[in-house]
Amino acid sequence: MNNELAELLFPNIDKTPEETEALFPQRNLKEGAMVTRFGPSPTGFMHIGNLWGAFLDSIMAKETNGICYLRMEDTDSKREVEGAKELILNALDHFHIHYDEGFGKDGSYGPYIQSDRKEIYQVFAKELVKNGQAYPSFMTEEELQEIRQGQEIRKEITGIYGHYATDRDLSLEEVKKHLENGDSYVIRIKSPGDMNKQIILHDCIKGDILLPENIIDEVILKKDGIPTYHFAHVVDDHLMKTTHVIRGDEWIPSYPKHLQLFQMLGWKSPKYAHHATLTKKEDGKIRKLSKRKDPEFSVSYYKEAGIPAEAVRLYLATLSNTNFEEWYLQNKDKTLEDFTFSYKKMPVGGTLFDIEKLNNICRTYFSRLTADAVYEDCLVYNLEYDTSFAQLMKDNKNRLISFLNIERNAKRPRKDIATYKDLKQESFYMLDSLFFDDAKVTYREMEEKKYDITLLEEYATIFEEGDSYEQWYERVKNFADEHGYASEVKTYKASPEEYKGHVGDICEMIRFAITGRTKTPDLYQILSILGKENLKKRVKFFQKYLQEL
Ligand code: GLU
């Protein structure tokens, strides 16, 4: 009877499971090599948690000389939107997430898009029907809803199982009648599960987790013959020889279904690594990142915000292994590819995704680049997002690179740049056209302080281009002495009433007049880059501004 039923339901499926298996031979990989896969659904939205999963897939495969492949999981056609697959491919490309085979690439385990694998799933669904392990269920939406409502009222497990699974016992004649009527149906497994039994998930990240055995007659093929996520996952990960399923921990409750399906099909299940869900702290409370509230949840946010892809990778690495950050800070000349990641060091619980922390990582990242690289990368960004600034960058290339070089190789390198956008505001005073554009904006940081403009004018005349740092400082100190300022801070502090201020106050005045900032990288170097004429011009500009106040 089961054979006949299987033929009745799947008349077009003539391949056997053996023939299908033969199309997916064992992979010829070394012992310990992991085969991982990234299985995004093309919904038009990719979040940073998805990207994190892809990152983990990619690094774990690479680290073990294994294979990472991309499988497009589009069985839920209701959720699919145009351009969604491109969005995923672009994100993987942008964040340099490498995969060896799969959608958009070659590979011998395809098709790598689930909608093209319909017949493959049906081969195995047919086999389950043949073996009496699956059956067609003709229950209508109304019937299902009624059952669910009753179960909820009685606080029972919801779903089709036990005496709710009435279609388990349909005779061949009854099935035929339904088919003749054109009644739609799904294929459900006959779950052999026992409500009183438990199974253990040996999770690579979270350790052993006890879960109830699955008792539900889960749907494996929907009305249109398309598999559910559960069935597609099991069939694909078996055939494509996945060794490690890395996925979000929201899937843990589904694991009993998956294990059961592997067992019913007589297959070995892969290992599972369920990574934590990304969370955010808000008003002292921890909550999941949200598509609606948190722009940083979307992978599309980072490119436009000017956050380097490599810095995002570094942050994902920080989230991935608890010992990564310390290693990165200690190893200035290494990249994350040099680090050995392990499941054991992955966080088990909810993981905070802290944009401030990412910001700090960005600063460290930029501080380790050469000035030329910062310039080039910022230029690429601005060519796309701020073309007028890009033009200014081109016109002032040498000046900007000299500026970026200030304190770059210092013991504590400067960390003023966190995004490609920041270069504009951090360097605006080095670019004459921006600096002289609007005095009100240029000097907006003006403090309640006395600025001695005559003193500044005079300073501009004694400044010598080409002075070494020591010569320059000596000159400023002499200048201070001659104008009633202490040349040493110490001397000033001993008897402040005798002086107008000290050498530092003079430097602050110069700094403010020529940059409009109270804090900048090394003043001597800025002066050296700008030169004497520009210094004079800027003092005049400041004077005019003060007069107009
Ligand atoms: N398509 C599933 C999702 O987007 C993938 C889950 C998995 O990796 O197994 O959530």
Image (cartoon, rainbow, N blue to C red):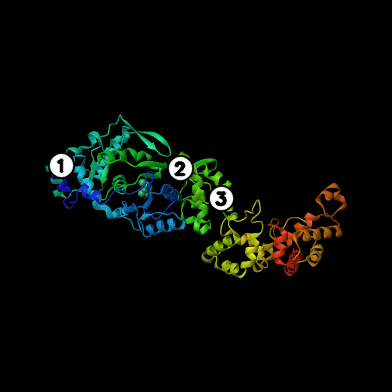
The answer to whether any part of residue 386 appears in the image is yes
Q: Amino acid at mark 2?
A: Ser
Residue in front for this viewpoint, 535 or 238: 238
Q: Is residue 411 above or below residue 206?
A: below
The answer to whether any part of residue 138 appears in the image is no
Residue beneath disc 3? 361
- Residue density around tag 3, few if under 14, some if 14–19, many if 20 or more, within 10 Å: many
Q: Amino acid at mark 1?
A: Asn
Q: Position of residue 382 (x, y in %)?
A: 54, 64
Distance in Å between CA atoms under marks 1 and 2 = 47 Å
Distance in Å between CA atoms under marks 3 and 1 = 61 Å
Secondary structure at numbered mark 3: helix
Q: Is residue 78 above or below residue 379?
A: above
Who comes first in sequence, dot 1 or dot 2?
1
Q: Position of residue 163 (x, y in %)?
A: 22, 34
Which residue ends up furthest to the front in the rendered image? 30
Q: Position of residue 268 (x, y in %)?
A: 30, 40
Quarter occupied by residue 159: top left
Q: Position of residue 471 (x, y in %)?
A: 78, 61
Q: Amino acid at mark 3?
A: Ile
Left or right, 161 with respect to 100, comes to left
Who comes first in sequence, dot 2 or dot 3?
2
For image coordinates 24% across by 36% down, the residue present is 164
For residue 342, the mark is: 2
Of circles 2 and 3, the one toward us is 2
Residue beneath disc 1? 2
Secondary structure at numbered mark 2: loop
Secondary structure at numbered mark 1: helix
